[in-house]
Amino acid sequence: MGFFDSLPQAPKLRPHLNVGSVFDIPTGNYVLGQHGESILNAGVSTVNSIAGPGNTFKSEILNYLFFTVMARYSPSQGAAYDTENSMTYKRLNRAANRHWQLKDVDFSSAEGANKLRLTQSADILGDDYFELIKEGSRERAKASKKLEIGTPFFDDSGKQIAILPPMLVNIDSLTEFKVSAVQDKLVDKNAVGESGANTQFMKDGAAKTQLITQLPNMGVQGGLYFFLVAHIGMGIEMDPYAPKAPKLTHSRSGTKTKGVPEKFSFINNNLFEIFDAKVLYNSSADKSARYPKSDSDRIAGTSDLTVVHMVNTRNKNGPSGIKFELVISQSEGLLPHLTNFHFLKGQNYGFSGNNTTYVLDIYPEVTLSRTTIRSKIDEDPKLCRALEIVTQLRQMELYWSDIDPALHVTPDVLYKDIKELGYDWDILLDTRDYWVFECDESKEKPFLSTMDLLRMRAGQYVPWWYPKKT
């Protein structure tokens, strides 16, 4: 018997869950599917966290990731644990209803509660809640062969890869996560300010360390995906000679995550740290919304739109240190397509025209401007799809060092060459770029990734679903 014969071998590929906008390209890579299509294995992985100061839309970003997964992967279910007793069904429903797959869902109803269960710490403290989640993970792992669903991914032997239906666990926030043994003693035995409370806070940190170190294994074994929020504040060191706590390379200097142990920085597959959030004005002189949607947005001093600046300080599936700008509406949440537009305008990429009126190079039929982009995004799914493709083209250039220069071209060249090959862009833009479970294929638009478009131009690929008569 060889030395390795008794050692389990890790799978070559574990499917990740696509969430779109600016998140996917930096967090993964393309692999070939059954039909020769290029599938982006990227996005949400086992442990995903948002950290930032107060009032910087951490929960909105988390809800975007959480409900995008729930919408695109229909067998998924969600467990939301509200440690601050402030989340409402109205907020959850609003975030979910932005996705056509979850339109009109009401999580407070009996049917909705089977899709997502909201639990608050006032009803069950964190360690007891975590034990229930852990037990559920064990049961799912035991029944995995019966529960697994087919994906479009295949292993080297040609066998289809199947995974458990995603169970999404949202903890907002880990900073305020309370442990029963500590909480009981704080309430019963220590008055505010007594020194005995200090040791209880140390025990609280130890309990959280035990919790978070279990997340990676629990997630992979039971098909769980964790979404965590942590608060960030200024780090003040009273002792100038105290050793410096280790920080991730791209974390902002002088800040510290509050109420979470050191290991929090290292167990994440994706850790996004917010370092700034500003109202998105048109200019310092004209303080109306940069991208107005209604008449109220054109009034000076409007504050509905915010641009959130963050950096991916921990990225186990791609390069760390990538900075993001997310456009968030206080009334509508994170706006993925407007985020794509804002990114491309900042890069001055993929447009033709002048400073006020322009078109996307791969969708020249629609004229755009700063003041009309939001309404046109709401009205035109093909415009949204075009923005997504061009955003991914630019991100490949910026973040992938191994991109093939002979394959990758600018949007204008891609558009011209694809048309000359006889393809219809109206058909190509009526597609999706995210993978879905085998059971959901018939409910969705045809699949076409940005890499597939580049390969089509190079004569390396023809979509299997494309109408042959054209």
Image (cartoon, rainbow, N blue to C red):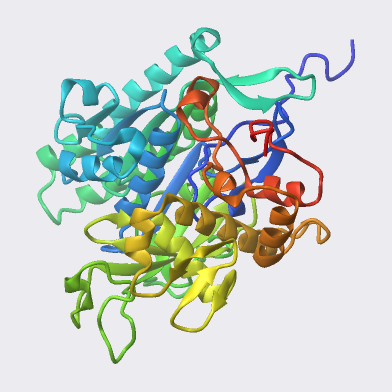
Quarter of the picture holding the C terminus: top right
Q: Position of residue 265 (x, y in %)?
A: 50, 51
Residue 396 falls in which quadrant of the image?
Answer: bottom right
Q: Position of residue 313 (x, y in %)?
A: 54, 59
User: Is residue 287 rendered to the left or right of residue 41?
Assistant: left
As drawn, the residue found furthest toward the bottom would be 285
Residue located at (16% from left, 46% from top): 86
Residue located at (28% from left, 62% from top): 329
Quarter of the picture holding the N terminus: top right
Between residues 43 and 3, which one lies in front from this camera angle? 43
Relative to 216, say whether 191 is above or below. Answer: below
Relative to 83, say whether 128 is above or below. Answer: above
As drawn, the residue found furthest toward the front would be 469
Residue 53 falls in which quadrant of the image?
Answer: bottom left
Between residues 1 and 172, which one lies in front from this camera angle? 172
User: Is residue 51 rendered to the left or right of residue 162?
Assistant: left
Whether residue 277 is visible to the viewer of this picture, yes or no, is yes
Between residues 136 and 463, which one lies in front from this camera angle? 463
* Circle count: 0
Between residues 245 and 323, which one lies in front from this camera angle? 323
Residue 167 falls in which quadrant of the image?
Answer: top left
Whether residue 242 is visible to the viewer of this picture, yes or no, is no
Residue located at (64% from left, 59% from top): 393
User: Is residue 128 rendered to the left or right of residue 73?
Assistant: left
Residue located at (60% from left, 58% from top): 320
User: Is residue 433 rendered to the left or right of residue 369?
Assistant: right
Q: Position of residue 391 (x, y in %)?
A: 56, 60
